[in-house]
Image: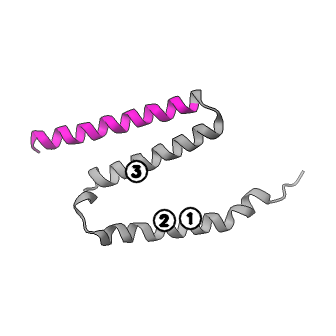
Amino acid sequence: MSNAHSRHYLTIWFWLMALVILSVAAASLLPKLQAMVLIFSVAIVKAFLVARHYMHLKNERAIIYAIALVPLVFVVIFLVGLFPDFVYHPTKP
């Protein structure tokens, strides 16, 4: 592996570590709702960085992204559809 590639992977790794530190700090310092929003946002950014750089998806055609996004769309639809069951489900005393 060339030195430029090593430096690139190391840069991405440092960004991932900085985002982990940001998530941990948010959990400790921010109110619960704000911390959750920030942590999930950071998780999405980290997933994008890993997929794009470590899985080499930045060099792929658009069909690969479409194949990856279709299941995610279904997950979002199912979560939105089932959300009332999770929230308003009566609990037993």
Can you name the residue that lies furthest to the left here?
Answer: 2
Mark before the other along the chain sequence, 3 or 2: 3
Q: Secondary structure at mark 2?
A: helix
Q: Is residue 60 above or below residue 1?
A: below
Hey, what amino acid is under mark 3? Ala
The kind of secondary structure element at disc 1 is helix
* Whole-percent x, y for residue 9 in the image: 23, 42
- The reply to whether callout 1 and callout 3 are in contact (CB within 8 Å) is no
How many other residues sit within 10 Å of disc 3, few (<14), some (14-19) or many (≥20)? few
Residue occupying image coordinates x 87% and y 54%: 92
Q: Position of residue 73 (x, y in %)?
A: 50, 68
For the residues marked 1 and 3, what is the alpha-carbon distance in whole angstroms?
Answer: 17 Å
Instruction: Tell me the element at label 3.
Output: helix
Q: Quadrant of residue 70?
A: bottom left
Task: Confirm whether the magenta stretch covers residue 18.
Answer: yes
Q: Which mark is residue 47?
A: 3
In the rendering, at what x and y percent does residue 32 appear? 65, 36
Identity, as a three-letter code, of the amino acid under mark 1: Val
Residue 72 circle label: 2
Residue range (magenta): 1-27
Q: What's the CA distance linking mark 3 and mark 2?
A: 13 Å
Circles 3 and 2: CB atoms closer than 8 Å: no
Q: Residue at x 49, y 35 (%)?
A: 23
Amino acid type, callout 2: Leu
- Residue 82 falls in which quadrant of the image? bottom right
First of labels 1, 3 by sequence position: 3
Asked if the residues shown at circle 2 and circle 1 are in contact, with their CB atoms under 8 angstroms apart, the answer is: yes
Q: Which residue is mark 1?
A: 76
Characterize the magenta stretch by its predominant secondary structure: helix
Question: CA–CA distance between discs 2 and 1?
Answer: 6 Å
